[in-house]
Amino acid sequence: MGAPKFSITPPKPFRNDDLSTVLAKLEALEREVLFIKRKLAELEGKPIRRPPMPEPKISGPVDRPVPVADHAVYLLDHVDLGNVRVIETLIDWVQFLLSKVGQEGIDDVIQYYQEINWITEDVANILRSYARGMRVEASQGYMMPEDHAKSLDYISRIKEAMK
């Protein structure tokens, strides 16, 4: 089995983007690079080392302690399986993911979304359960940044349906 093939496409020019858009694109690229590094380390059988969390930057004098979150905040912490619109959107999302990465890559994408706090473990298990029951041909075998953006759209549609 040879080395995995990755298709790296250069980012689109930043000329007309404002600073926040440029930073968002850079952060997305950093996440993609980290994901690829983890996959390579996993394929090579090396232990996966996570970089230390940077200390929070505080500007100006602080006369009270900075609160620390007791738990992670997720974009999608639960789904209402009694809501037909939610189920339809979940099915569409899983079909979309499968069309990009297939059955072989769906667990990796779902795990990645957990690691970056987009979804909880409960939501991840529901997505995996739906994926096991579907057969969709993968078109590319990997996710592009715009594919992750579409996943964010699915998350927002699910949250909207639960309001």
Image (cartoon, rainbow, N blue to C red):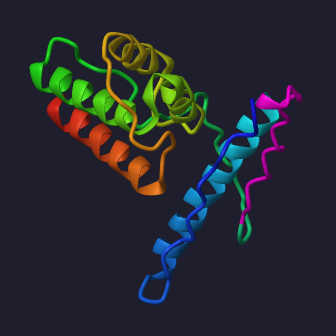
Q: In the rendered structure, does residue 53 fall within the stretch colored magenta?
A: yes
| Residue in view at x 74 percent, y 61 percent | 57
In this image, 159 relative to 104: left or right?
Answer: left
| Residue in view at x 46 percent, y 35 percent | 101
Q: Residue furthest left?
A: 84
Image coordinates of residue 90 in percent, x first then y, are 26, 26
Report the label total. 0
Tell me the quadrant of the picture where the C terminus can be found: top left
Seen in the picture, residue 129 relative to 34 is either above or below; the reply is above
Tell me the quadrant of the picture where the N terminus can be found: top right
Image coordinates of residue 23 in percent, x first then y, are 56, 70
Judged by its main secondary structure, the magenta piece is: loop
| Residue in view at x 71 percent, y 70 percent | 59
Image coordinates of residue 130 in percent, x first then y, are 33, 14
On the image, which quarter does residue 114 sit in? top right
Image coordinates of residue 133 in percent, x first then y, are 32, 10
Q: Residue furthest front?
A: 1
Seen in the picture, residue 54 relative to 4 is either above or below; the reply is below
- Can residue 109 be seen by looking at this rendering? yes
Seen in the picture, residue 86 relative to 147 is either above or below; the reply is above
On the image, which quarter does residue 11 sit in? bottom right
- Can residue 163 be seen by looking at this rendering? no
Q: Residue furthest bottom?
A: 15
In this image, 37 relative to 103: left or right?
Answer: right
Q: What segment carries the magenta color?
A: 43-58
| Residue in view at x 46 percent, y 22 percent | 103
Q: In the rendered structure, does residue 93 fall within the stretch colored magenta?
A: no
In this image, 33 relative to 71: left or right?
Answer: right
